[in-house]
Amino acid sequence: MPIPTPIGVGPRYHPPAVIRRCNQPAPQRVHLELFANGRVVLVPPRIGCWTSDPTGVLHYRGRATLGGFFRAWRQRLSRTRLLSFSGRVLAFRNGRRVVGDPRSMRLRDGDELVLEVGGYVPPHRSYLFPRH
């Protein structure tokens, strides 16, 4: 049973989008959840063609990585940085811990991805995507 996690307060927990026009979202998608200090960090809509709403669903084509998404968003991601937060970044794919640089994580259609820094929130194992 998922544990409700509050959304963080202030601009660090509500980072802005890099607004770019997008004609049509790509067909492949993953769900990305971000947590800092035990609070939800929102993934905004209109990050190029990557996001169309604030649900954390990323749309992509072909071989994409989390690093590619964060570059398009113009936000920081490394083993020790998540946006403006510093500390060890934990990465999870479908509820299982992924070791290594989170920027190199390949996106796989249908996956649930979780990044955390400054605390631990039990990661979700899946996400119920809305129909296209």
Image (spheres, grey):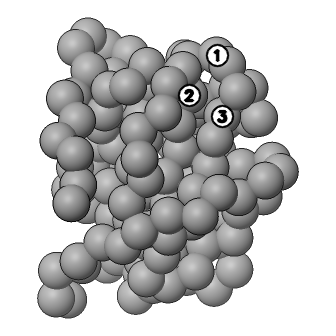
Q: Amino acid at mark 3?
A: Val
Screen quadrant of the C terminus: bottom left
Quadrant assignment, res 66: bottom right
Q: Are marks 1 and 3 in contact (CB under 8 Å)?
A: no
* 95 on left or right of 39: right
Q: Where is residue 120 drawn, in percent x and y?
A: 48, 33
Q: Amino acid at mark 2?
A: Val
| Residue bearing the label numbered 3 | 89
| Residue bearing the label numbered 2 | 117
Q: Are marks 2 and 3 in contact (CB under 8 Å)?
A: yes
Quadrant assignment, res 55: bottom left
The tag earlier along the polypeptide, 2 or 1, is 1
Q: Where is residue 10 drawn, in percent x and y?
A: 26, 10
Quadrant assignment, res 17: top left
Q: Amino acid at mark 1?
A: Ser
Screen quadrant of the N terminus: bottom left
Q: Are marks 2 and 1 in contact (CB under 8 Å)?
A: yes
Q: Where is residue 130 drawn, in percent x and y?
A: 16, 80
- Inter-mark Cα distance, 1 to 3: 8 Å
| Residue bearing the label numbered 1 | 86
* 1 on left or right of 13: left
**Point 16% across, 88% down: residue:** 131
Q: Secondary structure at mark 2?
A: strand
Q: Where is residue 82 drawn, in percent x and y?
A: 59, 29
Vertical side of 34 occupied by 21: above or below: below
Vertical side of 96 occupied by 110: above or below: below
**Point 38% across, 25% down: residue:** 38
Count of marks overlaid on the render: 3
- Inter-mark Cα distance, 2 to 3: 5 Å
Front-most of residues 75 and 116:
116
Vertical side of 14 occupied by 103: above or below: below
